[in-house]
Every structure is written in C-alpha cells, then in structure tokens.
Image (cartoon, grey):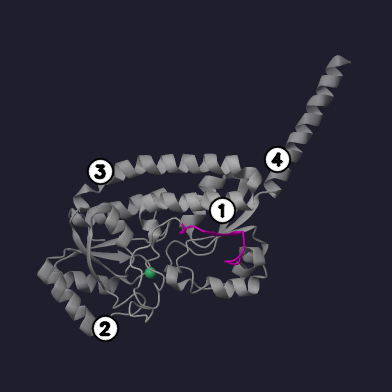
Amino acid sequence: MASRIVESCAAACCALLILLGTTSAEAALRVVATFPDVADMARQIGGDRVSVETIAQGSQDPHKVPVKPSFVTKLNRADALVVNGLGLEHTFLPALLEVASNPKILPTGAAYIDASVYVPVLEVPTSQNRAQGDLHPLGNPHIGLDPVRGKLMAKAIADGLTRVDPAGAASYQAGLERFTALLDRKIAEWQRLAAPLRGVKAVSYHQDLIYLADRFGLEMVGTIETKPGVAATAGHLEGLIDTMKREKVKLVIREVAYEMPLARTVAEKTGARVATISTLTGGLPGTRTYVDSIEANLKALLGAVQGGAPG
Ligand SMILES: [Zn+2]
C-alpha cells in the first residue's frame, strides 16, 4: 500500500514537473531584437525566461536591412523589443512598428529596450545640416564593436527586461553578472592580444570604428565612403589615397556587408592590406555569439597588421 502511494505520488510529481516545464516554456518572455548583438546579450542575460528572435542578420549592413512581412508578425506578438538605438535601426524599424500594432514596444512604450542609453555617444554632429551624412544624425551608433561599451549595453538590456518582467529581476541580475564577468575575462585577454594594433593607422569602408579604435588604439584616418551612407566619388578616393600614402596607412578595414573590390583597389594603390570584419555579431564565418564576433574581428585585424593572408 505504502509503495503504491509512493508510486502514485512520484507519477503525480512527474506529471506536475512536465506541466510546469511546459508552462514555463510557453510563458517565456517573447523578445524581438533588431540585431544579433543585442539578441545574443538578451539570451545570455535572460536565459530560459526569454525566447529571442532577431530581425537582421550578422552579414547585413545595419543601415540597409531588407524589410520582410514576417518581421511585422514577430513584432506584433513581442512582449519586448531590444534595439541597439542611436538611430541604427532608423532605415527599417519605424516603418515596421507603424504596422505592427503593438504600442508597448513603441519608443515611448515600457517594453522598448534601448541598449544605448548608458553609452556616452561619440561623433555627435554639432549641427543638424546632415553634413556628416544621413545615417548618423544622433552620433555614431556602432557602439557594440567595443566590448567595454558592450557591458553598458548589457546592463541596459538587463534593466529593460526587469522593467518588463519584474518577477525575473533576480534572474536577470544574475544573468547580467555572469555575462559581465565573461566579458571582463575576455576583455583582459583581448587587450593583450590586440597590443600590436595600438597606434596603427587605418581606413575603414564605413565610419563605424570609432568605438573599437578608441578601445584598442587604432588611429582612423578616413573612410572609403565619402560620408556615412554616401558612396565614394572619384575625387574623394583620390584624396583618401593621397592621405594614406602621406600618412603611411597600411590597413584597410572592410566591413563584411560592404563590397570587397573597392577596398582591395584602395589597398593595392597604397600597399595596404585588407582586413574583413563584421560590425554585427555573426557576420564572419564561425561566429555565433557577441564574444565570438569581437574576437574574430580582432584576429582579422591582427592578421592583416601582422602580415597574414590578406582579408
Ligand atoms: Zn553607420
């Protein structure tokens, strides 16, 4: 008799655990993230409490994400939206939000989580005459390329998830601490790894490396684009090549979403090497997480600086 009770209790407990398991999976907070960087951070911080879907892919130009109807469905059902912020989504998100019929994830809503809020912004235009191009009107939005600023983004995401789901506060705090500790370990390693980059002069295709350069000591001398989002003209390229020759710039950084031939031409005319990096997580082969991507970028830069195979 006693053993039958134990057995039936065990069965009931099993059923309850299965039920709870199912319930918690179903109840996961539905998070939509605009970019893979902030998506990875939300997953690392949120763990099992969140299910995260991403809009853009890592190999895409963040300023030119093609809009698909499926994004509207995702946004319509979202409990929270995580964005990079600083206008990096401005070419696709406002239009999607307009039709997604989900007021809580609008920029004015409580479930709109802006990862940039704790990051001091660089290259803020002093005037709004669009002289710096149309793509960076709020300052340079490419904050995630620096992992120290990445920690501030993670904190903003943890705070946002807590605001949307207060019952998970302790869990998000623990997730943030775990992710920050991981980044701290990696940052110490990356600072040693990246020592040969210090003082190296470089040009990039797009004006997106200010934060990375600031962290690891690269000196950015110019861009292949005339201005952010404005294609190179022959006159601009001539000036850039002259500057590179004069300043002995031997590194051309080509972001994976931008075309290789022009970067290669500039490099050939100046005796520089090309390093291919990705401004978004997951844009380079073999990278999946934010940490993978920062590391792959550094290795690509070091490979070019130290004379490895051209990127
Ligand atoms: Zn940009």
Q: Amino acid at mark 1?
A: Gly
Q: Main secondary structure of the magenta part?
A: loop
Give the mark nearest the N terminus, 2 or 1. 1
Instruction: State yes or no: discs 2 and 3 in contact (Cβ < 8 Å).
Output: no
Q: Amino acid at mark 4?
A: Gly
User: Height in image: 289 above or below 220?
Assistant: above
In magenta, the rendered stretch is 106-117
**Rendered-image quadrant of the C terminus:** bottom left
Q: Amino acid at mark 2?
A: Thr
Q: CA distance from mark 4 to mark 3?
A: 44 Å
State the image coordinates of residue 218 (x, y, percent, origin top left). Answer: 23, 58
Give the mark nearest the N terminus, 2 or 3. 3
Q: Looking at the rendered structure, which numbered label has been put on residue 233?
A: 2
User: Height in image: 227 above or below 247?
Assistant: below
Residue located 70% across and 49% down the image? 26
Give the mark nearest the N terminus, 3 or 1. 1
Q: CA distance from mark 3 to mark 1?
A: 33 Å
Q: Nearer the viewer's eye, disc 2 or disc 1?
A: 1
Q: CA distance from mark 4 to mark 1?
A: 25 Å
Q: Looking at the rendered structure, which numbered label has been put on residue 21?
A: 4
Give the mark nearest the N terminus, 4 or 1. 4
Judging depth in this view, the residue of 41 and 298 nearest the camera is 41
Could you say whether the residue bearing mark 4 is in a helix, strand or loop? helix
Q: Does the beta carbon of the residue at mark 4 sit less than 8 Å from ligand 1?
A: no
User: Height in image: 246 above or below 173?
Assistant: below
Q: Is residue 21 left or right of residue 213?
A: right
Mark 1 crowd level (few <14, some 14–19, many ≥20, 10 Å Cα): many
